Image: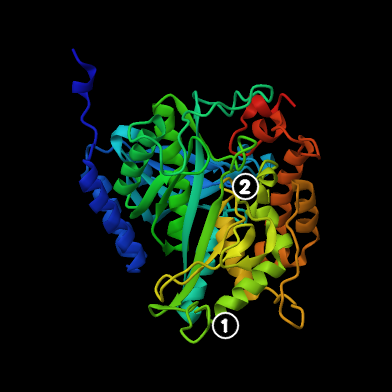
Amino acid sequence: MDQTQLRNFLEIPYDELQNLNLEAKRRFTNKESETSVRKYYIDYLKSEPRLKAVTLCFSDIEGRFHMLDYDKEYFIKNLDGLTFDGSSIRGFSTIDQSDLRLKPDWYSFRWLPSDVFGPGKVIMFGYVCEQDGSPYSCDFRYSLHLTLQEMYKKNKLEYFVAPELEGFLLSGQYAEQSFDEKEGFQEASEGGYYHTLPTDTLKLFIDKAAEAQRALGFENEKDHPEVAPSQFELNFSYTDALLACDQIQLYKLVCRQIAHNMGMTASFLPKPVVGINGNGMHINLSLHKSGKNLFYDENDESKLSKTAWEFISRILNHANDICLILNASVNAYRRLDPHFEAPNQIKYSYTDRSSMIRIPLSTQKSTRIEIRSVGPDTNPYAVALVLLKTGLEGEDLETDEDKRQRTRVLPDSIQDAIKQFKASEFVGNVLGEYAKSKYVEQKQIVANRSPKDLGKTIKNGEVLYHHEITNQVLWNKF
């Protein structure tokens, strides 16, 4: 007997998935009451017999994605008592106070493509809480949520983000965990910018990932091979900052799973291969109020408002303070090389792609600033939170009398970035001293496991001890 006939788990066609997930996003963007949204989904879970489990996910302090599958019946009965062992998550609680709580974020409810993730499951993000239910300070998603909530409540301000996130398709499953610095990585495709053949391995991967993203309600814009061989980028539309960060985490999950299903690895190391372009995660951002883009001013020569110029000035002024958040790994500093279109100069520009901030051509609706120095392996919630608070609360950059920009560059190693981060009183005010100390503690441990000088070749340490790659076995080989 065919065993699949014994199972009747939920599988939804892609067009229906897209409609369901877009409707779920609208519940958030339309600001429907949390009470009604929670009731809607609990009623759905109770009434849908083909659902077997709810995947509840969260990101640790460094941005690594974690998932727990709860049996559906157990999940419904224990909504206020969902816990996990925080001491097993690097950078979270200590072993003597290990239990942390997870509070479901009902606005994040999504239906999953069953051919990618298997049938019978839905996914939600969770807020990490202390044992007493209060927000856990090392959950930057929760911190971002509370900041956005307070900002809207106080001034009706909304914060919008659109990421441009690049990755590499590598040959073999678990290519990163088996990395050997003598051999390096093997790219899965020789194609590059725009000219990859329509049925090349890379293009087939991109098509599958784009279809899954569309079904998840990402509202795709474009997807294409990037400049380097076997490099890809899939763009999705501008949206609320919290939604955008959730989609970054789901984007990486989708890409990794689809690549794995194809016998390959999707890597988001900033510089997995020397001699060619690295991976970035450009962050386009703006503030809105009552449907009006606060970064736009039709009377300004560049169409940017005073608010936008202040944002730029403050981010540039604090660029070294926050660099460790934007570039969170040893490998990230290998990418900040202007010879490969990477932005290491602390300045703004309309055209120069070695600048940290670019001002894109835009219309009133799309006016924004683009932060180009962000690596794809960082914690997106921490990035969005730090850029927002820096733009709103930071100190303005002092300029020369003729208003020319002074030439400054970002740190060239994680050790230098750690020093700047630790010495910054501003970062402590933005993140809180406890979260700041926990974050830098993890970065220092990894930095200590890699040579101080990057050199010309990628080292085992910067890959195997990378927060998105390492596991207990690799970590304990040190």
Residue 124 percent across, percent down from the top left? 40, 48
Residue 207 visible, this orientation = yes
364 sits to left or right of 138: left
Q: Is residue 222 left or right of residue 467?
A: left
- Name the quarter where the C terminus is drawn: top right
Separation of residues labelled 2 and 1 (CA atoms): 32 Å
**Quadrant housing residue 430:** bottom right
The residue at 43%/64% (across/down) is 240
Q: Is mark 2 on a helix, strand or loop?
A: helix
Q: In which quarter of the image is residue 315?
A: bottom right
Q: Position of residue 174 (x, y in %)?
A: 53, 26
* Residue 143 appears in the figure: no
Residue 401 left/right relative to 74: right
Q: Which residue is drawn at 45% across and 34% down?
A: 191
Quarter-of-image position of residue 282: bottom right
Q: Which amino acid does label 2 sit on?
A: Phe
**Residue count near mark 1 (Cα–Cα under 10 Å), binned few <14, some 14–19, many ≥20:** some
Query: Dot 2 surroundings within 10 Å: few (below 14), some, or many (20 or more)?
Result: some
Q: Where 39 sits versus 180, above or below? A: below
How many numbered circles does the render carry? 2
Q: Name the residue under label 1.
A: 306
Please report the residue visible at 76 percent of the width from the left and 83 percent of the height from the top.
Answer: 401
Q: In this view, does 246 lie above or below 293?
A: above
Residue located beneath label 2 in the image? 340
